[in-house]
Image (spheres, rainbow, N blue to C red):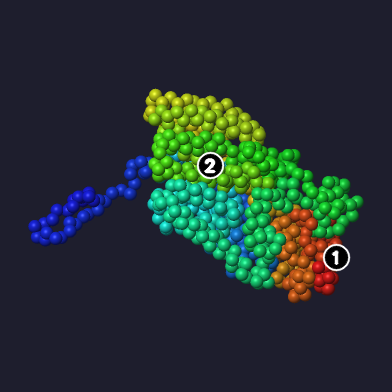
């Protein structure tokens, strides 16, 4: 039987009645046309390259961000810990992030066992998936070439690769934001409810991964829908309002559940000052990141309270001991470590925690530039080229707003610009790896620009004059980054020559149009070499999990548990003493900050932090610690360690006044050697004194 085209009716036999409807047989066609199949085929090596960059030697990163790894370990112990994302096994204080990204890691660890790879591989695979999703998002509005260029740019972005090799929650955030953009673009094309509501739900889920950072995609989606969706203006606005309400419901569902739970029946909300998720969301994880906050550049205080008393003559006179003998001293206002000493292997001894001070060029300067600045000039000029192409080709507003490129430009370009402005001008905590969330928008604009330049060359449009500026600016930015890092010196001239020749070939396509695509491919290939090699430096040393970054000198991890082998032995000696001298069950040991507890937790002990991540959260005071000791839930407290110089909290100060200090020689076999050294206190029998330290 022959297969007829779907629009050709099957012949009706003589026995068929006159009223019978003709029977149609659908044509069996391939789901992909030749162009789409070639596009997917070209995507395969990009995805393979992304997988290699994300996974090669990933096992050397061990537990990476040990703060999150310790939390996942604790979350596996009970559904209560899992739901409230408790940092410690005893459920004293939470991790300072919403749950979704950590739930993904905990689910993987529950299925495959708690081990470094079960925490790291999901993030690496999500990174590859993000590259594929970006390709699909770009293909319809901008075409195959633009989609492939965007996928390649994202796959080799150093900040994106460094984050994909870590167990921070940024990769799930990026994936959900990309999916939200994909659903939004579909909603703009069709005007249908399901896609718009799907976008709203996805943004809400992204919010439950990293709170307000997820909303940086909202301005582009909202403006894109209002301008480009097919419905009348009022209907568009009403639909967008309903979508916004759905987004808020999904966003705050888990927060509402936490807030409705009595404080006595859940862990303290780590990172907050008032034990509320709302306070954490809008202060520490929200406006504080933009306006400035304690713990950010210039807002790190050095105070007593989390460090055991010491005699200044006991240690050599240093700025540290000088600061600690003062009541309150503001640390020097420097954004990055300008004198970061090098180790014998050529890497920095300490990671770079922040970018340079806020400003319009911050994304190109030290701290952030080498993570994200490689293709930003091309993205900016490419964005402008797409806008000019749409306006000049369509001319009338009614036609412009229904051009698929316009929706893609507003949604993805809006994400790009919003993210860039926030990162460039925020005064609070902006770590270098935060730029990974800028990578998809930047990559999208690189791809869209590449497509616009090819189209301009073929049609001989005047905005092709932006191409030399885009390439020259990108080459200059890359050479600056390579020179600043003293990396690939030999590549400066070949890069400039290759990019220049490829650009001349593209300009020559004005006369020979068939050169346009090959010349653009060559241009992008030349511009992708430096960021690819820079991203591959993440293989050189174990990633520093708290501040993951790429670079030939980037600081490496201290060890599997986030501390050096000497400190691992100190932890083991300390726990050996505690377990042999009446350790309590719920918390064998309490520390000042979460970072000081991570080694103990990952080694299998029931440790907890009195003051959360920075050691200053008012989670516990003297009376509450007294109740914990009276109920035999806690006994031993260790002062010192990470962030101890920030002052601790009321509980740590009460320990100094009320509990018995155990000489270091008793459990460590040598004297205290630093003001930050662990000092062990026994609080058994000190309940009344602790309760008096309100």
Residue 350's quadrant in the figure? top right
Does residue 199 show up?
no
- The image position of residue 540, as x and y in percent, is 62, 43
- The image position of residue 473, as x and y in percent, is 56, 31
Relative depth, front residue between 182 and 522: 182
- The image position of residue 542, as x and y in percent, is 64, 48
Relative depth, front residue between 514 and 659: 514
Identify which residue is drawn at 85% across, 62% down: 663
Q: Which mark is in front, 2 or 1?
A: 2
Crowd band around label 2 with a 10 angstrom C-alpha radius: few (<14), some (14–19), many (20+): many
Relative depth, front residue between 534 and 326: 326
The residue where tag 2 is placed is 442
In the rendered view, would you say 35 is above or below 68? Answer: above
- The image position of residue 10, as x and y in percent, is 17, 53
In the rendered view, would you say 332 is above or below 272? Answer: above
Q: Is residue 310 left or right of residue 530?
A: right
Q: Is the C terminus in the top left, top right, bottom left or bottom right quadrant?
A: bottom right
Q: Are marks 2 and 1 in contact (CB under 8 Å)?
A: no
Identify which residue is drawn at 50% across, 38% down: 383
């Amino acid at each position: 039987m022959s297969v007829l085209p779907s629009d050709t009716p099957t012949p009706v036999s003589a026995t068929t009645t006159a009223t019978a409807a003709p029977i149609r047989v659908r044509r069996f066609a391939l789901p992909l046309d030749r162009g789409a199949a070639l596009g997917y085929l070209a995507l395969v090596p990009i995805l393979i390259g992304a997988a290699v960059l994300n996974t090669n030697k990933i096992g050397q990163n061990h537990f990476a961000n040990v703060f999150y790894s310790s939390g996942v370990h604790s979350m596996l112990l009970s559904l209560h810990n899992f739901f409230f994302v408790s940092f410690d096994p005893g459920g004293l204080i939470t991790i300072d992030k919403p749950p979704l990204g950590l739930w993904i890691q905990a689910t993987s660890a529950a299925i495959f066992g708690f081990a470094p790879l079960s925490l790291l591989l999901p993030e690496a695979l999500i990174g590859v998936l993000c590259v594929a999703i970006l390709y699909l998002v770009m293909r319809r509005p901008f075409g195959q070439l633009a989609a492939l260029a965007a996928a390649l740019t994202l796959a080799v972005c150093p900040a994106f690769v460094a984050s994909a090799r870590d167990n921070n929650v940024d990769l799930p955030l990026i994936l959900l934001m990309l999916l939200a953009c994909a659903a939004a673009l579909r909603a703009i094309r069709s005007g249908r409810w399901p896609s718009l509501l799907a976008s709203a739900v996805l943004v809400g889920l992204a919010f439950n991964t990293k709170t307000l950072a997820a909303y940086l995609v909202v301005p582009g989606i909202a403006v894109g829908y209002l301008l480009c969706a097919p419905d009348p203006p009022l209907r568009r606005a009403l639909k967008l309002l309903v979508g916004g309400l759905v987004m808020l419901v999904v966003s705050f569902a888990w927060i509402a559940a936490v807030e409705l739970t009595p404080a006595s029946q859940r862990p303290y909300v780590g990172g907050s000052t008032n034990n509320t998720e709302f306070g954490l969301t809008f202060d520490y994880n929200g406006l504080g990141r933009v306006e400035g906050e304690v713990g950010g550049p210039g807002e790190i205080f050095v105070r007593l309270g989390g460090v055991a008393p010491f005699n200044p003559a006991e240690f050599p006179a240093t700025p540290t001991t000088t600061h600690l003998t003062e009541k309150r001293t503001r640390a020097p206002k420097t954004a990055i470590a300008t004198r970061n000493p090098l180790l014998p292997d050529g890497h920095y001894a300490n990671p770079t925690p922040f970018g340079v001070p806020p400003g319009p060029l911050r994304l190109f300067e030290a701290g952030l530039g080498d993570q994200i600045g490689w293709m930003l000039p091309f993205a900016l000029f490419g964005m402008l080229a797409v806008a000019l192409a749409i306006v000049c080709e369509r001319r009338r507003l009614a036609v412009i707003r229904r051009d698929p490129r316009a929706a893609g430009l507003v949604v993805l370009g809006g994400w790009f610009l919003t993210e860039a402005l926030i990162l460039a001008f925020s005064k609070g905590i902006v770590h270098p790896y935060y730029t990974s969330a800028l990578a998809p928008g930047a990559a999208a604009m690189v791809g869209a620009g590449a497509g616009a330049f090819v189209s301009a060359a073929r049609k001989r449009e005047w905005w092709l004059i932006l191409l030399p500026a885009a390439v020259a600016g990108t080459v200059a930015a890359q050479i600056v980054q390579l020179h600043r890092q003293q990396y690939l010196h030999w590549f400066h001239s070949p890069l400039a020559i290759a990019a220049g020749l490829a650009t001349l070939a593209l300009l020559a396509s004005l006369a020979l149009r068939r050169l346009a695509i090959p010349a653009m491919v060559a241009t992008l290939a030349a511009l992708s070499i430096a960021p690819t090699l820079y991203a591959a430096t993440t293989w050189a040393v174990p990633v520093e999990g708290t501040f993951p970054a790429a670079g030939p000198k980037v600081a490496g991890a201290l060890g599997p548990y986030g501390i050096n082998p000497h400190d691992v032995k100190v932890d083991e000696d300390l726990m050996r003493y505690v377990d042999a001298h009446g350790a309590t069950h719920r918390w064998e040991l309490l520390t000042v900050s979460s970072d000081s507890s991570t080694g103990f937790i990952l080694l299998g002990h029931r440790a907890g932090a009195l003051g959360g991540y920075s050691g200053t959260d008012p989670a516990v005071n003297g009376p509450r610690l007294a109740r914990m000791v009276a109920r035999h839930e806690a006994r031993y407290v260790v002062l010192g360690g990470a962030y101890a110089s920030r002052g601790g909290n009321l509980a740590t100060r009460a320990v100094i006044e009320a509990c018995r200090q155990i000489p270091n020689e008793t459990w460590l076999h040598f004297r205290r050697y630093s003001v930050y050294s662990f000092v062990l206190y026994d609080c058994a029998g000190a309940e009344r004194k602790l309760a008096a330290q309100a």
